[in-house]
Image (spheres, rainbow, N blue to C red):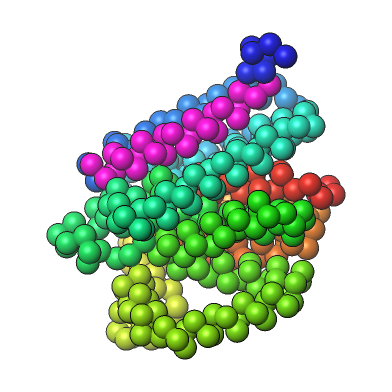
Amino acid sequence: MVPFEQFKKFYFLYFLYLGIIFDGINTVLAYKFGAGSFFSVSIFYRIFLILFIIIKFINKIEYVSVYKKLLLFILIVLIGQLSLNLQYSHDRLFEVLNMSSKLLYIYIIFIPINYYCTKYSDYAQKLKTFLYVFIILNSLIIMISAVFKIELFSSYRPQGYYQDLPYDQVRFGYKGIIPAINETMAFYFVAQAFIYREYFDKKNYTNLFILFLVVISGLLTGAKGAVISLIFISAYYLLKYNKKIFFLTVFGIVGIFIIYLDKILEFINQAFATLVYLFYHSSNSIEFLTTGRINKLFASIDFIKRYWSLPNYLFGGSEHFKMSIEMDFFDGYFLLGLGFFILLKAYYDIGFKFRRADEKFIFIVFLILSFWGGHMMTSAIFSTYYIIYLATDDKIHD
Protein backbone atom coordinates (compact mmCIF):
# COMPACT_ATOMS: atom_id res chain seq x y z
CA MET A 1 0.00 0.00 0.00
CA VAL A 2 1.46 3.39 -1.02
CA PRO A 3 1.75 6.06 1.71
CA PHE A 4 -1.03 8.29 0.30
CA GLU A 5 -3.49 5.40 0.17
CA GLN A 6 -2.59 4.47 3.74
CA PHE A 7 -3.07 8.09 4.84
CA LYS A 8 -6.42 8.21 3.06
CA LYS A 9 -7.54 5.12 4.98
CA PHE A 10 -6.20 6.03 8.41
CA TYR A 11 -6.14 9.85 8.39
CA PHE A 12 -8.76 9.99 11.16
CA LEU A 13 -6.48 7.94 13.40
CA TYR A 14 -3.76 10.50 12.81
CA PHE A 15 -6.21 13.19 13.90
CA LEU A 16 -6.74 11.28 17.15
CA TYR A 17 -2.99 11.13 17.80
CA LEU A 18 -2.81 14.85 17.01
CA GLY A 19 -5.48 15.40 19.66
CA ILE A 20 -3.11 13.91 22.28
CA ILE A 21 -0.45 16.44 21.28
CA PHE A 22 -2.90 19.36 21.61
CA ASP A 23 -4.00 18.10 25.03
CA GLY A 24 -0.34 18.08 26.07
CA ILE A 25 0.08 21.65 24.80
CA ASN A 26 -3.02 22.63 26.77
CA THR A 27 -1.50 21.19 29.93
CA VAL A 28 1.71 23.22 29.45
CA LEU A 29 -0.20 26.45 28.69
CA ALA A 30 -2.52 25.98 31.67
CA TYR A 31 0.51 25.47 33.91
CA LYS A 32 2.26 28.57 32.56
CA PHE A 33 -0.65 30.98 32.19
CA GLY A 34 -3.52 29.48 34.22
CA ALA A 35 -6.68 27.82 32.92
CA GLY A 36 -8.79 29.70 30.40
CA SER A 37 -10.35 29.35 26.98
CA PHE A 38 -7.83 31.75 25.39
CA PHE A 39 -5.02 29.30 26.05
CA SER A 40 -7.07 26.20 25.25
CA VAL A 41 -5.76 25.14 21.86
CA SER A 42 -7.90 22.00 22.18
CA ILE A 43 -11.03 24.13 21.75
CA PHE A 44 -9.86 25.35 18.34
CA TYR A 45 -8.71 21.86 17.36
CA ARG A 46 -12.11 20.46 18.39
CA ILE A 47 -13.91 23.15 16.36
CA PHE A 48 -11.79 22.24 13.32
CA LEU A 49 -12.47 18.53 13.80
CA ILE A 50 -16.22 19.07 14.24
CA LEU A 51 -16.43 21.14 11.05
CA PHE A 52 -14.25 18.65 9.16
CA ILE A 53 -16.38 15.66 10.21
CA ILE A 54 -19.65 17.44 9.39
CA ILE A 55 -18.44 18.47 5.94
CA LYS A 56 -16.76 15.12 5.21
CA PHE A 57 -19.79 12.96 6.04
CA ILE A 58 -22.66 15.29 5.15
CA ASN A 59 -23.43 13.30 1.99
CA LYS A 60 -23.62 9.95 3.84
CA ILE A 61 -27.31 9.14 3.99
CA GLU A 62 -26.88 6.75 6.94
CA TYR A 63 -26.02 9.73 9.18
CA VAL A 64 -28.84 12.06 8.12
CA SER A 65 -30.68 11.44 11.42
CA VAL A 66 -27.56 12.48 13.36
CA TYR A 67 -27.34 15.77 11.47
CA LYS A 68 -31.02 16.43 12.05
CA LYS A 69 -30.54 15.98 15.79
CA LEU A 70 -27.54 18.33 15.79
CA LEU A 71 -29.55 21.02 14.02
CA LEU A 72 -32.36 20.51 16.52
CA PHE A 73 -29.94 20.95 19.42
CA ILE A 74 -28.48 24.14 17.92
CA LEU A 75 -32.00 25.54 17.60
CA ILE A 76 -32.77 24.54 21.21
CA VAL A 77 -29.64 26.29 22.53
CA LEU A 78 -30.37 29.49 20.58
CA ILE A 79 -34.01 29.60 21.74
CA GLY A 80 -32.89 29.04 25.31
CA GLN A 81 -30.36 31.86 25.17
CA LEU A 82 -32.73 34.33 23.50
CA SER A 83 -35.45 33.53 26.06
CA LEU A 84 -33.30 34.52 29.06
CA ASN A 85 -34.24 37.74 30.81
CA LEU A 86 -30.65 38.89 30.43
CA GLN A 87 -28.91 41.31 28.11
CA TYR A 88 -27.38 39.48 25.14
CA SER A 89 -23.68 38.70 25.55
CA HIS A 90 -21.26 37.41 22.92
CA ASP A 91 -19.05 35.94 25.66
CA ARG A 92 -21.97 34.05 27.21
CA LEU A 93 -23.11 32.70 23.85
CA PHE A 94 -19.54 31.57 23.00
CA GLU A 95 -19.16 29.76 26.33
CA VAL A 96 -22.59 28.12 26.03
CA LEU A 97 -21.85 26.98 22.47
CA ASN A 98 -18.49 25.66 23.67
CA MET A 99 -20.12 23.64 26.44
CA SER A 100 -22.90 22.48 24.12
CA SER A 101 -20.36 21.27 21.56
CA LYS A 102 -18.75 19.14 24.32
CA LEU A 103 -22.12 17.82 25.42
CA LEU A 104 -23.06 16.89 21.84
CA TYR A 105 -19.59 15.69 20.85
CA ILE A 106 -20.63 12.07 21.19
CA TYR A 107 -22.81 12.51 18.08
CA ILE A 108 -19.89 14.00 16.13
CA ILE A 109 -17.20 11.49 17.09
CA PHE A 110 -19.58 8.55 16.58
CA ILE A 111 -19.85 9.27 12.84
CA PRO A 112 -16.24 8.65 11.64
CA ILE A 113 -15.55 5.85 14.14
CA ASN A 114 -18.72 4.00 13.16
CA TYR A 115 -18.14 4.61 9.46
CA TYR A 116 -14.52 3.42 9.30
CA CYS A 117 -15.02 0.45 11.62
CA THR A 118 -17.87 -0.64 9.36
CA LYS A 119 -15.90 -0.04 6.16
CA TYR A 120 -12.53 -1.53 7.15
CA SER A 121 -12.19 -4.80 9.08
CA ASP A 122 -8.85 -3.80 10.64
CA TYR A 123 -9.92 -0.33 11.78
CA ALA A 124 -11.14 -1.39 15.23
CA GLN A 125 -7.75 -2.99 15.91
CA LYS A 126 -6.01 0.25 14.94
CA LEU A 127 -8.27 2.17 17.33
CA LYS A 128 -7.50 -0.38 20.03
CA THR A 129 -3.77 0.19 19.51
CA PHE A 130 -4.31 3.94 19.77
CA LEU A 131 -6.13 3.50 23.07
CA TYR A 132 -3.38 1.21 24.42
CA VAL A 133 -0.72 3.77 23.48
CA PHE A 134 -2.42 6.64 25.27
CA ILE A 135 -3.28 4.58 28.36
CA ILE A 136 0.35 3.46 28.74
CA LEU A 137 1.77 6.92 27.95
CA ASN A 138 -0.44 8.85 30.36
CA SER A 139 -0.17 6.24 33.12
CA LEU A 140 3.64 6.28 32.99
CA ILE A 141 3.66 10.09 33.09
CA ILE A 142 1.39 10.03 36.16
CA MET A 143 3.54 7.45 37.97
CA ILE A 144 6.80 9.25 37.17
CA SER A 145 5.25 12.59 38.21
CA ALA A 146 4.14 11.11 41.54
CA VAL A 147 7.62 9.74 42.26
CA PHE A 148 9.51 12.92 41.30
CA LYS A 149 6.74 15.40 42.27
CA ILE A 150 6.56 17.01 38.80
CA GLU A 151 4.35 20.05 39.29
CA LEU A 152 3.53 20.40 35.58
CA PHE A 153 1.38 17.26 35.70
CA SER A 154 -0.26 17.98 39.06
CA SER A 155 -4.03 17.44 39.06
CA TYR A 156 -4.76 20.72 40.83
CA ARG A 157 -1.86 23.20 40.71
CA PRO A 158 -1.93 23.96 36.93
CA GLN A 159 -5.65 24.89 37.00
CA GLY A 160 -4.90 27.93 39.13
CA TYR A 161 -5.99 26.38 42.44
CA TYR A 162 -3.81 26.65 45.54
CA GLN A 163 -1.38 29.02 43.84
CA ASP A 164 -0.61 30.74 47.14
CA LEU A 165 0.32 27.47 48.87
CA PRO A 166 3.70 25.73 48.78
CA TYR A 167 3.63 22.82 46.36
CA ASP A 168 3.90 20.22 49.13
CA GLN A 169 0.62 21.56 50.59
CA VAL A 170 -1.33 21.35 47.34
CA ARG A 171 -4.02 18.66 47.17
CA PHE A 172 -2.47 15.38 46.03
CA GLY A 173 -3.01 14.05 42.52
CA TYR A 174 -1.48 13.81 39.04
CA LYS A 175 -3.33 13.88 35.74
CA GLY A 176 -0.66 13.34 33.10
CA ILE A 177 -1.11 15.29 29.87
CA ILE A 178 -4.91 15.40 30.05
CA PRO A 179 -5.80 19.08 30.58
CA ALA A 180 -8.25 18.80 33.52
CA ILE A 181 -8.62 16.43 36.47
CA ASN A 182 -12.34 15.77 35.82
CA GLU A 183 -11.49 14.65 32.30
CA THR A 184 -8.66 12.52 33.71
CA MET A 185 -11.17 10.81 35.99
CA ALA A 186 -13.48 10.18 33.02
CA PHE A 187 -10.58 8.83 30.94
CA TYR A 188 -9.49 6.40 33.65
CA PHE A 189 -13.06 5.16 33.98
CA VAL A 190 -12.88 4.20 30.29
CA ALA A 191 -9.33 2.84 30.66
CA GLN A 192 -10.36 0.59 33.55
CA ALA A 193 -13.37 -0.73 31.64
CA PHE A 194 -11.28 -1.30 28.50
CA ILE A 195 -8.33 -3.08 30.12
CA TYR A 196 -10.50 -5.30 32.34
CA ARG A 197 -12.50 -6.31 29.27
CA GLU A 198 -9.40 -7.01 27.21
CA TYR A 199 -7.70 -8.96 30.00
CA PHE A 200 -10.63 -11.28 30.70
CA ASP A 201 -11.28 -11.72 26.98
CA LYS A 202 -7.69 -12.72 26.17
CA LYS A 203 -6.03 -13.34 29.58
CA ASN A 204 -2.48 -12.51 28.50
CA TYR A 205 0.30 -11.06 30.63
CA THR A 206 0.58 -7.88 28.55
CA ASN A 207 -2.94 -6.82 29.49
CA LEU A 208 -2.24 -7.82 33.11
CA PHE A 209 0.76 -5.47 33.20
CA ILE A 210 -1.25 -2.64 31.64
CA LEU A 211 -4.05 -3.32 34.13
CA PHE A 212 -1.47 -2.83 36.89
CA LEU A 213 -0.48 0.53 35.34
CA VAL A 214 -4.12 1.61 35.11
CA VAL A 215 -4.92 0.67 38.71
CA ILE A 216 -1.86 2.46 40.15
CA SER A 217 -2.15 5.58 37.98
CA GLY A 218 -5.91 5.76 38.59
CA LEU A 219 -5.25 5.88 42.34
CA LEU A 220 -2.48 8.46 41.85
CA THR A 221 -4.87 10.88 40.10
CA GLY A 222 -6.28 11.74 43.52
CA ALA A 223 -9.73 11.88 41.88
CA LYS A 224 -12.42 10.19 43.96
CA GLY A 225 -14.35 9.29 40.80
CA ALA A 226 -11.39 7.27 39.49
CA VAL A 227 -11.19 5.40 42.80
CA ILE A 228 -14.94 4.73 42.94
CA SER A 229 -15.04 3.48 39.34
CA LEU A 230 -12.04 1.25 40.06
CA ILE A 231 -13.88 -0.32 43.02
CA PHE A 232 -17.09 -0.88 41.02
CA ILE A 233 -15.40 -2.24 37.88
CA SER A 234 -12.84 -4.40 39.73
CA ALA A 235 -15.50 -5.93 41.97
CA TYR A 236 -17.74 -6.67 38.97
CA TYR A 237 -15.10 -8.35 36.79
CA LEU A 238 -13.39 -10.27 39.58
CA LEU A 239 -16.66 -11.54 41.05
CA LYS A 240 -17.89 -12.58 37.62
CA TYR A 241 -14.72 -14.09 36.17
CA ASN A 242 -12.42 -14.98 39.09
CA LYS A 243 -13.93 -15.11 42.57
CA LYS A 244 -10.70 -16.49 44.09
CA ILE A 245 -8.72 -13.38 43.07
CA PHE A 246 -11.58 -11.18 44.27
CA PHE A 247 -11.49 -12.60 47.81
CA LEU A 248 -7.68 -12.63 47.88
CA THR A 249 -7.71 -8.96 46.82
CA VAL A 250 -10.24 -8.02 49.49
CA PHE A 251 -8.27 -9.83 52.22
CA GLY A 252 -5.05 -8.29 50.94
CA ILE A 253 -6.47 -4.77 51.03
CA VAL A 254 -7.85 -5.31 54.54
CA GLY A 255 -4.45 -6.59 55.66
CA ILE A 256 -2.63 -3.60 54.17
CA PHE A 257 -5.09 -1.23 55.87
CA ILE A 258 -4.48 -2.89 59.24
CA ILE A 259 -0.68 -2.85 58.91
CA TYR A 260 -0.32 0.65 57.44
CA LEU A 261 -3.42 2.32 58.89
CA ASP A 262 -1.67 5.50 60.09
CA LYS A 263 0.10 6.13 56.78
CA ILE A 264 -3.06 5.38 54.77
CA LEU A 265 -5.11 7.81 56.88
CA GLU A 266 -2.41 10.44 56.42
CA PHE A 267 -2.51 9.89 52.66
CA ILE A 268 -6.34 10.10 52.57
CA ASN A 269 -6.25 13.34 54.58
CA GLN A 270 -4.00 14.88 51.94
CA ALA A 271 -5.27 13.27 48.74
CA PHE A 272 -8.94 13.80 49.57
CA ALA A 273 -8.61 16.88 51.77
CA THR A 274 -11.80 18.46 50.40
CA LEU A 275 -13.81 15.29 51.06
CA VAL A 276 -12.38 14.95 54.58
CA TYR A 277 -13.20 18.59 55.32
CA LEU A 278 -16.77 18.14 54.07
CA PHE A 279 -17.16 14.98 56.15
CA TYR A 280 -16.56 16.96 59.33
CA HIS A 281 -18.14 20.27 58.31
CA SER A 282 -21.09 19.44 56.03
CA SER A 283 -24.43 20.64 57.34
CA ASN A 284 -26.16 17.43 56.12
CA SER A 285 -25.46 14.10 54.41
CA ILE A 286 -26.59 15.35 50.97
CA GLU A 287 -24.00 18.13 51.03
CA PHE A 288 -21.31 15.57 51.87
CA LEU A 289 -22.41 12.98 49.29
CA THR A 290 -22.50 15.63 46.54
CA THR A 291 -19.21 17.15 47.82
CA GLY A 292 -20.83 20.54 48.17
CA ARG A 293 -22.39 20.58 44.69
CA ILE A 294 -25.87 20.80 46.22
CA ASN A 295 -25.03 24.39 47.19
CA LYS A 296 -24.24 25.16 43.55
CA LEU A 297 -27.61 23.66 42.63
CA PHE A 298 -29.38 26.02 45.03
CA ALA A 299 -27.51 28.95 43.45
CA SER A 300 -28.60 27.76 39.99
CA ILE A 301 -32.22 27.50 41.14
CA ASP A 302 -31.98 31.10 42.34
CA PHE A 303 -30.65 32.08 38.87
CA ILE A 304 -33.59 30.25 37.26
CA LYS A 305 -36.11 32.10 39.40
CA ARG A 306 -34.60 35.45 38.46
CA TYR A 307 -33.80 35.07 34.77
CA TRP A 308 -35.73 32.18 33.20
CA SER A 309 -38.91 32.78 31.22
CA LEU A 310 -41.45 30.08 30.32
CA PRO A 311 -39.61 28.80 27.17
CA ASN A 312 -36.45 28.20 29.23
CA TYR A 313 -38.13 25.39 31.14
CA LEU A 314 -38.52 23.60 27.79
CA PHE A 315 -35.33 24.68 26.00
CA GLY A 316 -32.95 25.43 28.86
CA GLY A 317 -30.95 28.62 29.14
CA SER A 318 -27.60 28.44 30.85
CA GLU A 319 -25.04 31.01 31.86
CA HIS A 320 -22.26 28.51 32.35
CA PHE A 321 -20.14 30.21 35.00
CA LYS A 322 -23.20 30.88 37.16
CA MET A 323 -25.06 27.61 36.59
CA SER A 324 -22.43 24.87 36.22
CA ILE A 325 -22.72 22.54 39.21
CA GLU A 326 -20.63 19.64 37.78
CA MET A 327 -23.49 17.15 37.85
CA ASP A 328 -24.17 16.24 34.23
CA PHE A 329 -27.91 15.62 34.51
CA PHE A 330 -28.49 19.12 35.87
CA ASP A 331 -25.91 20.84 33.65
CA GLY A 332 -27.37 19.04 30.63
CA TYR A 333 -30.89 20.19 31.44
CA PHE A 334 -29.72 23.77 32.04
CA LEU A 335 -28.07 23.77 28.59
CA LEU A 336 -30.59 21.80 26.52
CA GLY A 337 -33.81 21.72 28.51
CA LEU A 338 -35.94 18.69 27.67
CA GLY A 339 -33.61 18.10 24.72
CA PHE A 340 -31.20 16.57 27.22
CA PHE A 341 -33.43 13.48 27.32
CA ILE A 342 -32.84 13.04 23.57
CA LEU A 343 -29.12 13.03 24.33
CA LEU A 344 -29.61 10.45 27.09
CA LYS A 345 -31.47 8.27 24.58
CA ALA A 346 -28.44 8.47 22.26
CA TYR A 347 -26.15 7.31 25.07
CA TYR A 348 -28.57 4.46 25.79
CA ASP A 349 -28.65 3.39 22.12
CA ILE A 350 -24.85 3.51 21.79
CA GLY A 351 -23.73 2.21 25.18
CA PHE A 352 -26.49 -0.11 26.44
CA LYS A 353 -28.86 -1.33 23.75
CA PHE A 354 -27.63 -4.55 22.06
CA ARG A 355 -24.49 -4.58 24.23
CA ARG A 356 -23.23 -7.54 26.25
CA ALA A 357 -23.75 -7.63 30.01
CA ASP A 358 -20.26 -6.28 30.83
CA GLU A 359 -20.77 -3.11 28.82
CA LYS A 360 -24.28 -2.65 30.17
CA PHE A 361 -22.80 -2.66 33.67
CA ILE A 362 -20.17 -0.10 32.58
CA PHE A 363 -22.97 2.07 31.20
CA ILE A 364 -24.78 1.99 34.57
CA VAL A 365 -21.57 2.97 36.40
CA PHE A 366 -21.11 5.78 33.88
CA LEU A 367 -24.59 7.12 34.66
CA ILE A 368 -23.87 7.02 38.40
CA LEU A 369 -20.54 8.85 38.03
CA SER A 370 -21.98 11.31 35.54
CA PHE A 371 -24.84 12.22 37.84
CA TRP A 372 -22.74 12.35 40.97
CA GLY A 373 -19.42 13.75 39.74
CA GLY A 374 -20.11 15.37 36.40
CA HIS A 375 -17.79 16.41 33.57
CA MET A 376 -18.28 13.16 31.70
CA MET A 377 -21.04 14.03 29.25
CA THR A 378 -19.55 17.53 29.01
CA SER A 379 -16.11 16.16 28.10
CA ALA A 380 -15.03 15.69 24.49
CA ILE A 381 -12.18 13.52 25.79
CA PHE A 382 -14.62 11.15 27.50
CA SER A 383 -16.90 10.98 24.44
CA THR A 384 -13.96 10.12 22.19
CA TYR A 385 -12.52 7.32 24.32
CA TYR A 386 -15.91 5.93 25.34
CA ILE A 387 -16.92 5.51 21.69
CA ILE A 388 -13.54 3.91 20.94
CA TYR A 389 -14.03 1.54 23.90
CA LEU A 390 -17.41 0.46 22.53
CA ALA A 391 -16.21 0.22 18.92
CA THR A 392 -13.28 -2.06 19.82
CA ASP A 393 -15.30 -4.82 21.47
CA ASP A 394 -14.31 -8.03 19.67
CA LYS A 395 -17.49 -9.76 20.87
CA ILE A 396 -19.98 -7.08 19.86
CA HIS A 397 -23.21 -8.56 18.56
CA ASP A 398 -25.22 -5.69 17.08
Residue 235, given in percent of the width and then of the height, sits at 65, 73
Residue 304 visible? The answer is: no
Residue 293 visible? The answer is: yes
Residue 158 horizontal side relative to residue 359, left or right: left
- Judged from this view, the residue extending furthest toward the left is 164
In the rendered image, the quadrant that contains the N terminus is top right
Residue 4 horizontal side relative to residue 308, left or right: right
Occupied quadrant, residue 298: bottom left
- Judged from this view, the residue extending furthest toward the right is 397
Q: Nearer the viewer, residue 221 or 242?
A: 242
Residue 130, given in percent of the width and then of the height, sits at 60, 38
Figure disc tally = 0
Answer above or below: position of 386 versus 333. Answer: above
Answer above or below: position of 46 versus 192. Answer: above
Occupied quadrant, residue 345: bottom right
Q: Nearer the viewer, residue 231 or 385?
A: 231
> Which residue is rendered at x = 39% and y = 79% of the image?
264
Residue 86, given in percent of the width and then of the height, sits at 31, 49
Occupied quadrant, residue 369: bottom right
Answer above or below: position of 192 versus 269. Answer: above
> Which residue is rendered at x = 73% and y = 78% of the image?
244
Residue 145, given in percent of the width and then of the height, sits at 36, 53
Q: Which residues are magenta?
A: 8-32
> Which residue is rendered at x = 60% and y = 56% of the image?
209
> Which residue is rendered at x = 77% and y = 53% of the image?
202
Residue 379 horizontal side relative to residue 347, left or right: left
Residue 279 included in the magenta stretch of the image: no
Q: Main secondary structure of the magenta part?
A: helix
